[in-house]
Image (cartoon, rainbow, N blue to C red):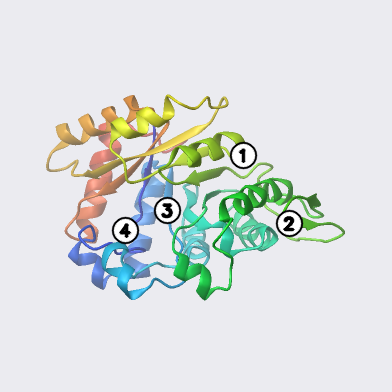
């Protein structure tokens, strides 16, 4: 089983962020990234919001590091761990913007990019960026098709319902022949979108029974990733509970586990990673 890390520091959701994270910066994040890389964890995450309305920040938090800048730094100090956006909002970008910027990241990281992508829900943020909120689902579907045609191609061409381009050069292109695309969201539609147009589903906000119920409704292609949150774990303090939670998440249908680590400091966080890696017998060589 692959285990990825929901990165600390880069977001600060009220009620979930640890006190030490409030004063932490890139050096603390780098310490954690190096440890996760060394121990064999599958990926680190970073989410995208340009600007969060003040009224919404009380629930979702106001801290969102930019994934491109963050992952560019982490790519330079790690060797094998994947860098997963969780998630980029498709409606904020032209597909070729994503192909160029994140294709470059895929190049500089040696082919370690995972693009988590979502339709988006913050209407105020769409309005701020002068992007249409209505019809964003259909626009996102077309963007996904355009991205699949563009990532890794130096001369991409595509003609769809919302996006069309040809006779354009995008260089550098992504290093991977097929950059993994994961679709975020907690609805049946998000899973259907992932199964039809992407390589995986990275949901949030439901319990394990809720994830299982949705998975039972959708036929998924071979090799499709189901990236489920295993919750907040304390493998040093309660390894038995941590293992039970990981097992239950896998039994709910996960092919990759997304874990959030309980910690009181950076050093404690690294201890927790070491304990978790031993608990699930991670192989640093894979």
Please identify the residue farthest to the right as the structure is shown.
Answer: 167
Mark 2 nearby-residue class (10 Å; few <14, some 14–19, many ≥20): some
User: Which of marks 2 and 3 precedes in the sequence?
Assistant: 3
User: Is residue 44 depicted above or below 208 in this figure?
Assistant: below
Earlier sequence position, callout 4 versus callout 1: 4
- Residue indicated by mark 3: 45
* Helix, strand or loop for disc 2: loop
Report the front residue among 112 and 146: 146
Q: Nearer the viewer, mark 1 or mark 3?
A: 1
Residue name at image x 38 percent, y 62 percent: 30
From the image, tell me which residue sits under label 2. Answer: 163
| Image marks 3 and 4: residues in contact by CB distance under 8 Å | no
Q: As drawn, is 130 to the left or to the right of 99?
A: left
Q: Closer to the N terminus: mark 2 or mark 1?
A: 2
Residue under numbered circle 4: 8
Q: Position of residue 62 (x, y in %)?
A: 33, 70
Indicate which disc, 3 or 4, sits on the residue closer to the N terminus.
4
Mark drawn on residue 197: 1
Q: Secondary structure at mark 3?
A: strand
The answer to whether mark 3 and mark 2 are in CB contact below 8 A is no
What residue is at 51 percent from the left and 57 percent from the top? 88
């Amino acid at each position: 089983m692959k285990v990825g890390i929901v990165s600390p520091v880069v977001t600060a959701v009220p009620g979930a962020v640890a006190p030490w994270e409030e004063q932490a910066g890139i050096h603390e994040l780098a310490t954690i990234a190096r440890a996760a890389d060394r121990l064999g964890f599958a990926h680190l995450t970073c989410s995208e919001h340009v600007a969060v309305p003040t009224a919404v920040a009380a629930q979702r938090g106001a801290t969102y590091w930019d994934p491109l800048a963050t992952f560019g730094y982490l790519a330079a100090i790690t060797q094998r761990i994947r860098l997963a956006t969780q998630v980029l909002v498709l409606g904020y970008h032209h597909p070729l913007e994503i192909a160029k910027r994140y294709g470059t990241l895929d190049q500089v990281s040696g082919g370690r990019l995972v693009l988590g992508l979502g339709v988006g829900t913050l209407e105020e943020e769409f309005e701020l960026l002068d992007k249409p909120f209505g019809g964003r689902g259909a626009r996102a579907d077309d963007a996904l098709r355009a991205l699949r045609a563009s990532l890794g191609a130096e001369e991409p061409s595509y003609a769809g319902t919302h996006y069309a381009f040809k006779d354009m050069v995008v260089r550098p292109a992504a290093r991977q022949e097929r950059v993994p695309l994961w679709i975020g969201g907690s609805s049946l539609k998000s899973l259907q979108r992932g199964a039809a147009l992407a390589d995986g589903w990275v949901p949030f906000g439901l319990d394990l029974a809720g994830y299982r119920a949705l998975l039972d409704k959708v036929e998924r292609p071979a090799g499709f990733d189901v990236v489920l949150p295993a919750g907040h774990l304390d493998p040093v303090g309660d390894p038995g509970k941590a293992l039970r939670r990981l097992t239950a998440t896998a039994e709910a249908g996960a092919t990759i586990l997304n874990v959030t680590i309980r910690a009181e400091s950076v050093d404690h966080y690294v201890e927790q990673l070491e304990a978790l890696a031993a608990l699930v017998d991670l192989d640093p060589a894979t």
